[in-house]
Each structure stands twice: as structure tokens, then as C-alpha cells.
Amino acid sequence: MKTRVQLEAGGVQLALYSQGEPSKPPVLLVHGYPDDHSVWDAVAADLCRDFFVIRYDVRGAGASEAPAATAAYQLEALAADLKAVLDAASPGRPVHLVAHDWGSIQSWEAVTDRRLRSRIASFTSISGPCLDHMGFWLRSRLRPPFRRHLPQLFGQLLRSWYVMLFHLPGMGYAWRLGVARLWPWLLRRTESVEAKQRANQARDGFVGVRLYRANFLRRLLWPAERATEVPVQLIIPERDLFVSPHLYDNLQQWVPRLWVHRMAAGHWLPLAQPLLLAERIRDFALTIEAREPDPLPSFRARAASVGAAHQVSA
């Protein structure tokens, strides 16, 4: 049974949800834009057999409060929210962090914070690169041999059309003018997935545009070096319409303990293949729980070395 409590973080009320037995290893699932915690429903239902599953509606989404100021959605504030969730839901045990889309983007901020190293046992990232890593990736693609990098650069720019659109004044109002009602239909047509019609969808879409305005330009133009010792499982949906696999080409520079899964799926993997995704999360988290030495033995039979990373296809 899922339980809900209210949590205050930085003056913002967050809706915090949990299910499963608290004595089991904790898994924290962080949703992206324009979703709320319910995007993980099927994944959470499967994982709670083996884990204590924690979720929350990020600020501006679902049952959580939505600050009016764009600056309130900067990554620093979002990472502070995540820490508050850790303090409230799993104060004495590190969590296995799993995040999708903007949930992953904001989770990178916490995963690369040395002050939180002992609080995060592992990180599974899905369709959400670190914006600072992306800033360095863009710089590398603008250096010679420039012509060789053009296909990757323009490929990602085409995928990021909506990011530029969201920076235009008034674009958030599109959600209130009809996009929210069309959202389940759009996902069905573009991703072949079924999504619920949510009461807060218009507000979440409208408010969530501030995530892009508060973070994208300043992180891409002035990126910081963000490395982590946390074991990271990178799951790459091969049919992702928004995130190019090439964005992760240099990731091992920042993440020495990296495992990569490529899956035949689109961007909304938690909705498209929840049971397979839950299996990937479970396998990785339980292996980390066993504290087995690198390379992780449960992956060894399926993994092929790519540099110092391990790559798996599903």
C-alpha cells in the first residue's frame, strides 16, 4: 500500500510517497517533466517486492507546491529537495537512486555532490544527462575536426527543438490552452504508450517550463566539472526522440564506475516497458547491495567492455 506524507523543503511543501517494507533496501524514484510520481506506478509496484520504494512529486508537479519565481527551480534547489527527501525517508541508509528525464538531470546535481556521496548507494539514469557534462560535450563538438562532429551536433539540436521553444515568452500557456488535454493522445501517437489524464497536467506543464529557463543556458554556457564515485547505471533508450546517445560519449571522464544498457524503447521507458526496467533496476541495485568488486559479476556474462565501461543491450 502506498502512503503519502507532506515534507517541507526550502519553504516548499513536497508530497512524499512510500510503499513496501522499510527494512528492505531503499530505492528512490524521481520523475521528469511533465510527469509526477505516478509515471513510476508500474515500476514501483514490481520493485516493492524487494525494496522500500520512495517517490515524491518534485516542486511544481503533482501534489507538491509550485513556487512562482523561476529561480526557485534552479538545480541547486532541486538537489536540496532531494536531500530533504533522503533525510525524511531514509536517514540511516543510502538509497538506490533511479531517475528519468528531468528527474535524472536534477539527480546528477546530487550524485556529483561529495557531501551526498554516503547517501547514494547507486544511480540509475534514464534519458536525462547532466547539463554540465552536456556543456563540455558541446564545447568538444565545436572544436576541430568540426566537420566530423557536425552530424552529432545537429542531431542533438534537432532533438532539442522544444528547449529553445520553452525559452520564448508565453510558451508555457500552451499547456493551459489545450496541450494538457491532448497529452495522453500525443504520447500514444509518438511513443505508443498509454498515459493517464491527470488533473494537474496543465499546471505541471505550465510551471515545469521554468526548469528549462532556470538552468539550461547557464549550465551549458558555464559548465562546472562534476564527477562522482557513485556506481552509475546508464540506460539509453535507442529510440529516444529527445536525447541523443552521443551525449554520453564522454561520460566515463566524469563517472569511472559506469555501466551502460541500451534498450529498444522510446523516451518514456517507465511507461513503455516498466517490468523490464524494474528488472534492470533490481539487478543493479542488489548487486551493489552485495558489495561485489568491479566489474559487477551479475553483469559480467552479458557485458562487453567499451573502454572501461560495460555495455549491455536489451
Image (cartoon, grey):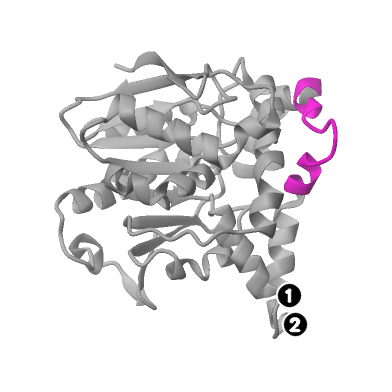
**Residue 166 shown in magenta:** yes
* Residue with the mark numbered 2: 147
- Numbered circles on residues, count: 2
Residue 238 to residue 38: above or below: below
Q: Is residue 297 above or below residue 73?
A: below
Q: Position of residue 165 (x, y in %)?
A: 80, 43
Magenta region: 162-177
Viewer-side residue, 12 vs 271: 12
Q: Is residue 39 visible?
A: yes
Q: Amino acid at mark 2?
A: Arg
Residue ranking furthest to the bottom: 145
> In the rendered structure, which amino acid carries the disc numbered 1?
Leu
Q: Which residue is mark 1?
A: 150
Q: Residue at x 60, y 35 (%)?
A: 33
Placement of the C terminus among the 4 image quadrants:
bottom left
Looking at the image, which residue is at 41% across and 49% down?
Answer: 113
In the structure shown, which secondary structural element does the residue marked by tag 2 occupy? helix
In this image, 61 relative to 88: left or right? right
Left/right placement of residue 272 relative to residue 190 reads: left
Q: Are marks 2 and 1 in contact (CB under 8 Å)?
A: yes
- Up the image or down, 1 lies above or below 194; here it is above
Question: Going 20% across and 53% down the picture, which residue do you hit?
Answer: 287
Give how far across and how far down residue 6 sits, in percent.
Answer: 42, 14
Q: CA distance from mark 2 to mark 1?
A: 5 Å
Could you say which quadrant of the image residue 32 lies in? top right
Label 1 secondary element:
helix
- Let me know if residue 239 appears in the view: no
